[in-house]
Image (cartoon, rainbow, N blue to C red):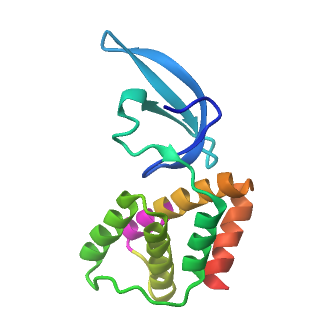
């Protein structure tokens, strides 16, 4: 169970801070929810407490884990991905769904490199933006920096 003020990650949405725990009536039943505020777009997300573990809600990573993500982003090692855009889309989506920060960093690096060579499809651009949001939001909380600083840090890691 998490408390107000805890910094957590909600897979596929990113990291944020639990700002309240509220009860809401839905279809005649009372349910408890974590209300999480994301640093990107100041968006608020309601997460049913009873489903928190099932959806993969977890505490944010530590500085060492984020340093490893930056190392992965700055690595010159090429990641082998399917040539077909549809297979590549599914391949990258599975990596994001895994919640593994290094795999999400690989998606960012792969798609940023591909975007330098040719324009990404709309679907791949969406996946790139989602992957960036996940990494940026968690990194902002771990390093205690604003989103713009973290975005510059990531861009510097990728593009030098």
What residue is shown at x 35% (from left), y 70% (from top)? Answer: 92
The mark tally for this picture is 0
Across and down, in percent, residue 136 comes to 60, 60
SS majority, magenta: helix
Res 51 quadrant in image: top left
Q: Is residue 72 above or below residue 95?
A: below
Residue drawn where x is 74% and y is 63% of the image: 149
Q: Is residue 109 left or right of residue 120?
A: right
Q: Is residue 107 left or right of residue 89?
A: right
Determine whether 31 is above or below 96 in the image.
above
Q: Is residue 64 magenta?
A: no
x and y percent of residue 95 in the render?
Answer: 36, 66
131 shown above or below 40? below
- Res. 32 image quadrant: top left
Viewer-proximal residue, 98 or 131? 98
Q: Position of residue 46 (x, y in %)?
A: 47, 31
What residue is shown at x 28% (from left), y 68% (from top)? Answer: 90
Name the residue rendered at 50%, 29% in the picture: 34
Write down the region rendered in magenta.
Answer: 121-129
The answer to whether 29 appears left or right of 49 in the picture is: left
């Amino acid at each position: 169970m998490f408390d107000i003020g805890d910094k957590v990650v909600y897979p596929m949405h990113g990291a944020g801070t639990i700002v309240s725990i509220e009860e809401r009536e839905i279809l005649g039943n009372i349910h408890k929810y974590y209300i999480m505020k994301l640093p990107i777009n100041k968006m608020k997300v309601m997460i049913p407490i009873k489903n928190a573990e099932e959806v993969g809600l977890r505490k944010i990573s530590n500085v060492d884990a984020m340093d490893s993500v930056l190392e992965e982003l700055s690595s010159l090692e090429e990641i082998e991905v399917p040539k077909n855009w549809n297979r590549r889309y599914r391949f990258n989506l599975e990596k994001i769904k895994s919640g593994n920060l290094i795999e999400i960093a690989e998606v960012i690096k792969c798609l940023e490199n591909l975007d330098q060579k040719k324009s990404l499809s709309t679907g791949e651009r969406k996946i790139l933006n989602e992957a960036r949001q996940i990494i940026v939001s968690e990194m902002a909380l771990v390093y205690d920096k604003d989103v713009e600083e973290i975005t510059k840090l990531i861009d510097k890691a990728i593009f030098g």
